[in-house]
Image (tube, rainbow, N blue to C red):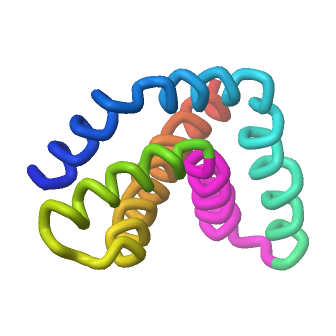
Amino acid sequence: MNVYYHSYLKSLKKNFMLVIMALVLLIPTFFIWAGVPFFIIGGAVENITTNPLLVYISISLSGGLLFSLYFVPINLKAAKNMANTLGYDLVKSLICIQTIFIIVCSVIFGIISNIIIRL
């Protein structure tokens, strides 16, 4: 975990503009990465199955996936740093980092959507 943390710190120190660009892009595209999971993916899965847990998981995973796509350039820079530091393959590092990022974003998206739905 310490290696990931230092890779991100090193890549963010050099390329802080990537974070600003990703955050700026998240605002006008809010209805794409937040609306598509609820209305399109959730509706499609709800037509296939009536299990609310599967619908919730599909909404969370698709929301996390769409949200994490904005941060692929940052994850690529961190993967390059990690690959250079540890001697791993770049693709393997990127897949590992992106998978962790998708899972974390999915959990956060699921928690926030659950809180909003309960209101």
**Please, is residue 21 above or below residue 79 in the view?**
above
Residue 107 lies in the magenta-colored region: no
Question: In which image quadrant can residue 103 be found?
Answer: bottom left
Residue found 54% across the figure and 34% down from its top: 112
**Please, is residue 56 above or below residue 34 in the view?**
below
Position of residue 22 measured from the top left corner of the image (x, y, whole percent): 59, 31
- Residue closest to the eye, 94 or 45: 94
Residue 55 lies in the magenta-colored region: yes
Position of residue 106 measured from the top left corner of the image (x, y, whole percent): 51, 52
Question: In which image quadrant can residue 10 be found?
Answer: top left
Residue found 35% across the figure and 77% down from its top: 92
Residue 76 as seen in the image, left or right of residue 47: left
Residue 42 as seen in the image, left or right of residue 65: right
**Please, is residue 98 above or below residue 45 in the view?**
above
Position of residue 95 measured from the top left corner of the image (x, y, whole percent): 42, 71
Residue situated furthest left in the rendering? 2
Q: Which residues are magenta?
A: 49-69
Residue found 88% across the figure and 56% down from its top: 40
Residue found 55% across the figure and 31% down from its top: 115
Residue 42 as seen in the image, left or right of residue 17: right
Q: Main secondary structure of the magenta part?
A: helix
Quadrant location of the N terminus in the rendered image: bottom left
Residue 119 as seen in the image, left or right of residue 20: right
- Residue closest to the eye, 35 or 99: 99
Position of residue 110 measured from the top left corner of the image (x, y, whole percent): 54, 46
